């Protein structure tokens, strides 16, 4: 069993590079891979999706914190926006995880697969409202609407096991925030989502939901192994992103998300 745990850091490297490469998507990759791996490690099949979601969200806390710290040093985190969104993100993440633990494993699998397909369509066909001009005059979205939006983002993120970047970044860019600051701000928001959601999966889980080495639905070897490796690997993805053509990356990753969706559905048939 301990030898199989070495797969988690390897998975963290892949997820970290992907997250650094595009700013979104690492969580979806983690969920799909963990849904396949965890049953091989003694996790009951009927709890595999719950454990995959919970462990992915727990690992995102450290990854998002490291990313937010790096972006903050470059002045790319809009902290007033984060402050307005955090109450909604925390409440949404908590309620979303409370809802998810009551859903059947197959239902969760279909929801995550459907979200992968929607994210792929957005990458392939969506258009961003890219803003030009001096980054210094970037608007700072504030107010109750941002808190409400945070609630929805937190809830959906908890159900599909992600840090919310695929929703937060487009929202901020639509408000006129420059893309680099949207990504930085989204990273800070991901910390709140991961904390509230992982805590919800840990505390809302039925007693004895998983075997040893788990807190509720959070499988600690997966969460810790993925987290440390992804933190180290994310800068590599960031460097690659500056060298590769953005449109080509989006097309490749859109296809990759379709493959992730298919893999989740296939895993449910076995």
Image (tube, helix red, strand yellow):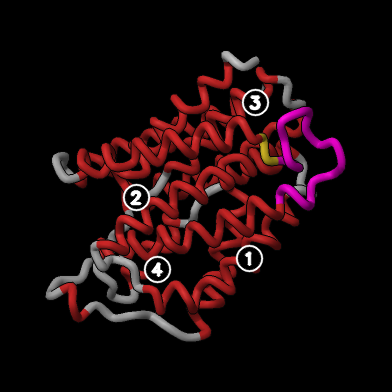
Q: CA distance from mark 1 to mark 3?
A: 26 Å
Assess whether residue 204 is covered by the magenta stretch: yes
Looking at marks 1 and 3 on the same chain, the residue that comes earlier in the sequence is marked by 3
Q: Nearer the viewer, mark 4 or mark 2?
A: 2
From what the image shows, is residue 117 above or below residue 182?
above
Q: CA distance from mark 3 to mark 2?
A: 26 Å
The reply to whether discs 4 and 3 touch (Cβ–Cβ < 8 Å) is no
Tag 1 secondary structure: helix
Q: Nearer the viewer, residue 85 or 77?
A: 77
Q: Nearer the viewer, residue 185 or 114?
A: 185
Tag 2 secondary structure: loop
Assess whether residue 114 is covered by the magenta stretch: no
Residue lying at 55% horizontally and 36% vertically, measured from the top left: 224
What's the mark number on residue 171? 4
Which residue bears the numbered disc 2? 23
| Residue extent of the magenta highlight | 201-217
| Displayed quadrant of residue 79 | bottom left
Left or right, residue 151 beside residue 230: right
**How far across and how far down the image is residue 48, in percent?**
69, 32
Q: Residues within 10 Å of mark 1 (few under 14, many from 20)?
A: many
Left or right, residue 128 beside residue 24: left
The reply to whether discs 4 and 1 touch (Cβ–Cβ < 8 Å) is no
């Amino acid at each position: 069993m301990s030898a199989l745990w070495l797969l988690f850091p390897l998975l963290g490297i892949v997820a970290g590079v992907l997250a650094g490469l595009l700013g979104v998507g690492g969580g979806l990759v983690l969920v799909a891979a963990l849904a396949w791996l965890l049953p091989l490690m003694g996790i009951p099949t009927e709890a595999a999706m719950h454990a995959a979601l919970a462990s992915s969200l727990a690992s995102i806390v450290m990854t998002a914190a490291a990313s937010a710290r790096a972006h903050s040093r470059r002045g790319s985190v809009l902290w007033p926006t984060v402050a307005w969104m955090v109450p909604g993100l925390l409440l949404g993440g908590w309620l979303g995880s409370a809802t998810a633990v009551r859903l059947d494993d197959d239902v969760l699998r279909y929801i995550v697969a459907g979200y992968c397909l929607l994210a792929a369509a957005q990458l392939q066909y969506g258009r961003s409202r890219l803003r030009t001009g001096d980054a210094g005059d970037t608007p700072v979205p504030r107010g109750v609407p941002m808190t409400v939006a945070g609630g929805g983002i937190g809830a959906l993120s908890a159900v599909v096991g992600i840090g919310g970047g695929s929703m937060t970044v487009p929202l901020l860019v639509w408000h006129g925030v420059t893309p680099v600051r949207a990504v930085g701000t989204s990273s800070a928001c991901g910390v709140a989502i991961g904390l509230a959601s992982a805590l919800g999966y840990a505390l809302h889980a039925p007693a004895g939901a998983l075997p040893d080495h788990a807190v509720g639905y959070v499988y600690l070897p997966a969460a810790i192994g993925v987290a440390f490796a992804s933190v180290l690997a994310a800068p590599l993805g960031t460097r690659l992103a500056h060298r590769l053509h953005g449109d080509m990356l989006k097309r490749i990753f859109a296809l990759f998300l379709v493959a992730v969706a298919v893999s989740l559905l296939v895993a449910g048939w076995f």
